[in-house]
Amino acid sequence: MEDFILFLLVGFFAQMVDGALGMAYGVISSTTLLAFGVPPAHASAAVHAAEVFTTGAAGASHLHHRNIDWKLFWRLAPFGILGGCAGAYVLTGMEADAMKPIVTAYLALVGAWLVLRSFRKIPSKPVAPTIVAPLGAAGGFLDAAGGGGWGPIVTTGLLGFGGTARYVVGTVSISEFLITLSVSVTFVLALVTGRWENAGELTEHLSAVAGLVVGGLFAAPLAGFVVKTLNETMLLRLIGILIVFLAGWQTAEQLALI
């Protein structure tokens, strides 16, 4: 019961941040699970199982508040699904810790750039199609392999290339539902085929998953309203500061293990 209440609070906070800024549910939830000793593959599977519910609710909220760029969605989601399935396949067969230093360095640089951009009048513009596809594939892969990363990689990348904050956050959020569903199906297939040999231990963390789901569902309906209300400058600053903080936190954790 204590685990359920704790992760209910974690899920609520993580989804409020993710729904408003287009990122961090997976990172916050996975980091908390890992801190409690949950193996990386189990943490990623648990978070994606919870996100099937929370991303669906958050996407519906953004849809209601008209925060979706449908042209961007159709260029982004298919490649995110492919990348996510590939990442889940890799994670169930090997550790993905080697990628973390690269990801955190990338996040720190992009986060700093977004904070800088918020203080300069850089006009928003449509993101080039040649950027969207590889960004979606990379975001999906790192999200599944690292237990979180779709929002930090894709949202920051699209904003860095000039996307409008409100529509980037909404589109990334509704795309995440399909990526999360695909990743979860890949985990199930890995279990059924025997590739994921130690998956049985995941049942020990069901109360944490339930807490993440319930907490996230309470927070998700507020996401679309928050994004619609905040102006773009404020969104850019909040997102940039959040990314730099997360990158610094993960870097400190890696250094502590050396």
Image (spheres, rainbow, N blue to C red):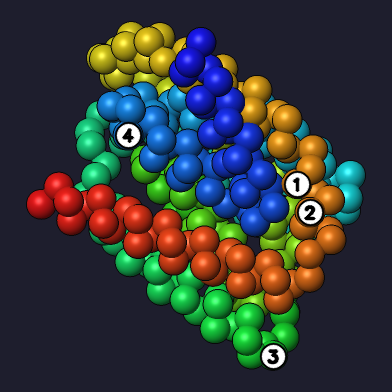
Q: Earlier in the sequence, mark 3 or mark 1?
A: 3
Could you tell which of marks 4 and 1 lies nearer the N-terminus? 4
Q: Which percent across, then down, holds residue 209? A: 51, 20
Secondary structure under the numbered disc 2 in the rendered image: helix
Residue type at mark 1?
Ala
- Contact, mark 4 vs mark 1 (Cβ under 8 Å): no
Indicate which label's residue lies in the foreground, 3 or 2: 2
Please report the residue visible at 72 percent of the width from the left and 86 percent of the height from the top.
Answer: 123
Q: Quick check: marks 3 and 1 in contact, CB under 8 Å?
A: no
Report the front residue among 97 and 245: 245
Q: Quick one: label 3 or label 2, which is nearer the N terminus?
A: 3
Which label's residue is closer to the chain start, 3 or 4?
Answer: 4
Can residue 76 be spotted in the picture?
A: yes
Where is mark 2, residue-wise? 226
Residue 121, disc = 3
In the rendered image, which residue does mark 1 sit on? 223
The span from disc 4 to disc 1 (Cα, nearest Å) is: 27 Å
Tell which residue pokes out farthest to the left in this image. 258
Of tags 3 and 4, which is closer to the observer? Answer: 4
Residue 184 image position (x, y, % from top left): 51, 26
| Left or right for 114, reference 258 | right
As helix, strand or loop, the secondary structure at mark 3 comes to loop
Q: Tag 1: Cα neighbours inside 10 Å, few (<14), some, or many (≥20)?
A: many
Q: Is residue 124 shown above or below 144?
A: below
Query: What residue is shown with label 4?
Result: 35
